[in-house]
Image (tube, grey):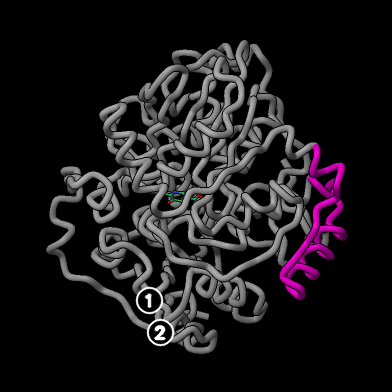
Amino acid sequence: MRYVSTRGGAPELDFEGVLLAGLARDGGLYVPESWPRLTADDLRGFGGLPYADVAARVMRPFVGDCLPPAEFEALVAESYAGFDHAAVAPMAQLGSNEWLLELFHGPTLAFKDFALQLLGRLFDRVLARRGERVTVVGATSGDTGSAAIEACRGREAVDIFILHPKGRVSEVQRRQMTTVDAANVHNIAIDGTFDDCQDLVKAMFNDGAFRDSMRLSAVNSINWARIMAQTVYYVTAAVALGAPDRRIAFSVPTGNFGDVFAGYAAARMGLPVAKLIVATNANDILDRFFETGEMTARPVVPTLSPAMDIQVSSNFERLLFDMHGRDGRKVSQAMTAFRESGAMTAPAEAMEDARALFASARLDDDGIRAEIADTLSATGHVVDPHTATALHAGRVRRGDPATPLVCLATAHPAKFPDAVEQATGRRPALPERLATLMELPERMTGLPNDLAAVQDHLRARSRVGVGA
Ligand SMILES: *Cc1c(COP(=O)(O)O)cnc(C)c1O
């Protein structure tokens, strides 16, 4: 499989290349040059298989010959062996034809473990073979950080630096990052928003000399391997509910557009997806986009669902690439215009196509509290604030009630105890594996929202920087 940049100005790479590169050199994102096909027989064959077996088969065409099949299968099996549910991504029925896809049974209790447990292992394997090291840099508004750190901790070939917006991630989420006791793990609290953190990471990648000397690499949702890994649970959920013979709708709590783009990728591969419902919180740029066809940025407001407190969703560019007929020049122009004016308009015909698959809805904090409370009283399930947006969006946009609706539960409610307590009057208990979290000492460095300060910090601490 070859990969091309969404901006058309970077070299084509193979899987190993995009795994290590993250962002493309022209500022674009890598996408497969064509979509592999899942046939109806493939889908039927997945019925009843263990999650890891389906995962290896769905991902195989994306990996190509970068790893021998048996080695790849072993890595995949190992990646999901640490999940605390035999089904890995089990479903719970909430109501008539309505399901919760529980993506929080991994080591950090959020869906990002699905991609990052695999990514950490792929990195280590590929780098060891090449005798190389990398510096992983990432920005997090919550779950990416802990999931990435958990995936990279103690790995010989990797130093990891995670930027989070100071005071804007929940205490549990912060502690999941800062209490990890490993010399290769570096937490940075930035005086700013998540978008500031993301801009700093992008700026480091766009500084060619810095990028090369530090051998920068990304685990943010811009890394193609993450999207690839996330397509799998759309497939297992759809197959469990009757694919290929039935179409399935998915409602997805959305921030950087990585998770819902994985659903789009699954649809392009042939999964019978009836609808992809983009659920947003009060930061509703995507909801406004699907409504009006125009993307206009507004300042980010903090909400009860911080992993979705994003205005400019980096993975959206991958959809934009298809909406512009896979013409990198047009994407590049649109992104430049967006950066300069804060607005962009999608081509009208492409918007019509997009609306045939995508729908959207927003839910503000009052709505989130009400949704958590209503879900508990109606179903007995306690859901986290991100999941609440998907339940609401699914209900108002699902369309035909005969179509099964799968709402993605992206985090365990115990990761957001304050919000859940506000809504229900009950504080969810931390699962066993995180029992000591609130007592362990924290390690982090506070830095201003300043590129030079962050770069100096990395230079001083990365083992790559020292050796270069
Ligand atoms: C990251 C995250 C999201 C948003 O996912 P994207 O892929 O960024 O759209 C939603 N919910 C939770 C709990 C998350 O951690």
Q: Position of residue 417 (x, y in %)?
A: 24, 52
Kind of residue at disc 2: Leu
Residue tagged 2: 447
Kind of residue at disc 1: Ala
Q: Residue at x 57, y 11 (%)?
A: 44
SS at circle 2: strand
Number of marks: 2
Magenta segment includes 180: no
Closest to the observer, 443 or 119: 443
Residue 45 appears in the rendering: yes
Residue tagged 1: 189
Q: Position of residue 301 (x, y in %)?
A: 48, 67
Q: Quadrant of residue 273?
A: top right
Q: Position of residue 400 (x, y in %)?
A: 60, 20
Does the CB distance between marks 1 and 2 fall below 8 Å?
yes
Q: Position of residue 263 (x, y in %)?
A: 60, 36
Numbered circle sitting on residue 44: none
Magenta segment includes 340: yes
Question: Is 112 located above or below residue 340 in the figure?
Answer: above
SS at circle 1: strand
Residue 137 appears in the rendering: no
Q: Residue at x 40, y 84 (%)?
A: 447
Q: Earlier in the sequence, mark 1 or mark 2?
A: 1
Question: In the image, which residues are magenta?
Answer: 323-352
